[in-house]
Amino acid sequence: MFTRNEGNLDRILRVILGLALLAGYFVFPEAAYRWAFLLGVVPLATGLVGTCPLYSIFGISTCPVKRS
């Protein structure tokens, strides 16, 4: 599958951010910018999977270095 390029802290923060944004969708049902809360799906999905496409494009990795 895809190479994991997110460390544990990065993944946890992404899941929390994604859940918070998705919760805002339900907490503020009359907000004009309600659609923006649906963007929380992106950090939630990347946090759960452990791979960020943008990290791959730019060659970034927050995974700890594995020492042999």
Image (cartoon, grey):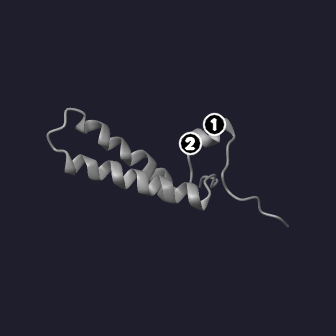
Neighbourhood count class around disc 2 (C-alpha, 10 Å): few under 14, some 14–19, many 20 upward: few
The residue tagged 2 is 53
Residue shown at the point (44%, 56%) measured from the top left: 15
The C terminus lies in which quarter of the figure? bottom right
Q: Residue 34: percent from the left, percent from the top?
A: 23, 38
42 vs 8, left or right, is left
- 1 up-or-down from 57: above or below: below
Q: Residue placed at 63% from the left, 52% from the top? A: 5
**Outermost residue to the left:** 30
Tag count? 2
- Residue at left offset 57%, top offset 39%: 54
CB within 8 Å, label 1 to label 2: yes
Q: Is residue 41 above or below residue 49?
A: above
Dot 1 surroundings within 10 Å: few (below 14), some, or many (20 or more)? few
Q: Quadrant of residue 66?
A: bottom right
Q: Amino acid at mark 2?
A: Pro
- Is 51 on the left-hand or right-hand side of 39? right
Helix, strand or loop under label 2: helix
As helix, strand or loop, the secondary structure at mark 1 comes to helix
Tell whether 59 sits left or right of 44. right
**Considering depth in this image, is 2 or 4 the residue closer to the camera?**
4
Q: Quadrant of the N terminus?
A: bottom right
Q: Amino acid at mark 1?
A: Ile
Query: Label 1, label 2: how many angstroms apart (C-alpha)?
Result: 6 Å
Question: Splitting the image into 4 quarters, where does residue 9 fall?
Answer: bottom right
Residue 33 % position (x, y): 25, 33
As drawn, the label of residue 65 is: none
**Which residue, given by chain and number where applicable, does mark 1 sit on?**
57
Q: Can you give x and y, in whole percent of width and height, for residue 24 in the image?
A: 27, 48
